[in-house]
């Protein structure tokens, strides 16, 4: 049985949680009246491409956490393939950190396998095949070939285990480090721990924090692995130059790659 087929079978039991609530001020004015995930790359919104990729690997249940320009996201969700069940969950405090967005999906995270995804990533479907095909119940995708600009969430690995993650956190020792793609596969038992830790960081910060703060605490409680994607084309869209690179370099490379599958 091929790795791709294994991924498709696993995917049917997974719910994707896409965080698409933030304001994305660093992309203003492009995002003043548009959700960042709805910006177009290759003639199609980033979020639509993400839903296409999930559908292609067999994921059928998707929850999108919405906030800024929520009605636009709902309208796009309504155009998803009929085989997919798409739910939109509101985060009324979307101008705070992403931890509150993830907390809005807490009931799902504690009862079934989930794939937590940032909504602003342009990526090939191979990312999902590798993550879903991993035997580890908890795993991050990482790119070890990254350039460290200080903006990246770095994920540190010792042996086969993730030991730390964050933009500024550096553990005393590690074997490998890579940039986090913004995708995390989580089993329900670890999900229950994650929600407890989310509640802790939200209480400590009055909600002004990122969900990665809770994930950093989780890796000391649960065995979490890292799945590599170095060498594959992708980008997170945080700045205007990222959007330009996605359009001019990353998406054309992905299109060529997937044309041969």
Image: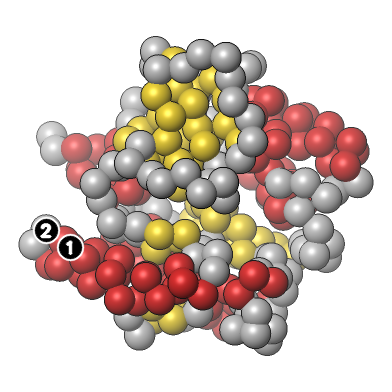
Find residue 261 and name its label.
Answer: 2
* Quarter of the figure with the N terminus: top left
Residue at image location 32% in from the left, 48% down from the top: 127
Q: Can residue 110 be seen in the rendering of this structure?
A: no
* Spatial CA span between label 1 and label 2: 5 Å
How many neighbours does mark 1 have within 10 angstroms: few (below 14), some (14-19), or many (20 or more)?
Answer: few
Q: Can residue 26 be seen in the rendering of this structure?
A: yes
Using the image as rendered, state which of residue 150 and residue 84 is in the foreground: 150
223 sits left or right of 234 in the view: right
* Quarter of the figure with the C terminus: bottom left
Q: Secondary structure at mark 1?
A: helix
Residue at image location 63% in from the left, 30% down from the top: 169
The percent position of residue 82, horizontal first and vertical second, equals: 41, 73
Find residue 258 and name its label.
Answer: 1
Instruction: Work out which residue is located at the far left of the displayed protein and give it.
Output: 260
Picture quadrant of residue 250: bottom left
Using the image as rendered, state which of residue 19 and residue 217 is in the foreground: 217
99 sits left or right of 20 in the view: right
The percent position of residue 83, horizontal first and vertical second, equals: 39, 66
The percent position of residue 70, horizontal first and vertical second, equals: 69, 76
Using the image as rendered, state which of residue 91 and residue 6 is in the foreground: 91
Using the image as rendered, state which of residue 127 and residue 154 is in the foreground: 154
Find residue 242 and name its label.
Answer: none
9 sits left or right of 201 in the view: left
* Contact (Cβ within 8 Å) of mark 1 with mark 2: yes
Residue at image location 37% in from the left, 70% down from the top: 246
Colouring scheme applied when the structure was drawn: secondary structure
How many neighbours does mark 2 have within 10 angstroms: few (below 14), some (14-19), or many (20 or more)?
Answer: few
Q: Secondary structure at mark 2?
A: loop
Residue at image location 55% in from the left, 42% down from the top: 153
The percent position of residue 131, horizontal first and vertical second, equals: 36, 39
């Amino acid at each position: 049985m091929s790795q791709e087929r294994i991924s498709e079978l696993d995917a049917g039991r997974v719910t994707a949680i896409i965080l698409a609530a933030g304001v994305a001020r660093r992309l203003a004015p492009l995002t003043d009246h548009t959700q960042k995930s709805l910006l177009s790359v290759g003639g199609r919104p980033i979020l639509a491409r993400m839903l296409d990729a999930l559908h292609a690997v067999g994921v059928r249940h998707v929850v999108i956490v919405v906030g800024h320009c929520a009605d636009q996201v709902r309208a796009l969700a309504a155009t998803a393939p009929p085989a997919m069940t798409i739910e939109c969950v509101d985060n009324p405090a979307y101008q705070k950190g992403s931890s509150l967005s993830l907390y809005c999906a807490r009931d799902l995270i504690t009862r079934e396998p989930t794939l937590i995804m940032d909504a602003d990533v342009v990526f090939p479907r191979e990312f999902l095949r590798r993550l879903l095909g991993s035997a580890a119940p908890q795993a991050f995708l990482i790119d070890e070939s990254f350039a460290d600009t200080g903006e990246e969430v770095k994920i540190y690995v010792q042996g086969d285990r993730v030991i730390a993650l964050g933009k500024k956190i550096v553990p005393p020792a590690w074997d490998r480090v890579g940039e986090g793609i913004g995708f995390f596969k989580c089993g329900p038992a670890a999900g229950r721990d994650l929600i407890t830790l989310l509640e802790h960081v939200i209480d400590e910060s009055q909600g002004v924090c990122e969900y990665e703060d809770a994930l950093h605490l989780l890796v000391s409680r649960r065995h979490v692995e890292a799945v590599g994607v170095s060498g594959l084309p992708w980008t997170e869209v945080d700045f205007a130059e990222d959007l330009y690179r996605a359009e001019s370099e990353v998406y054309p490379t992905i299109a060529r790659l997937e044309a041969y599958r």
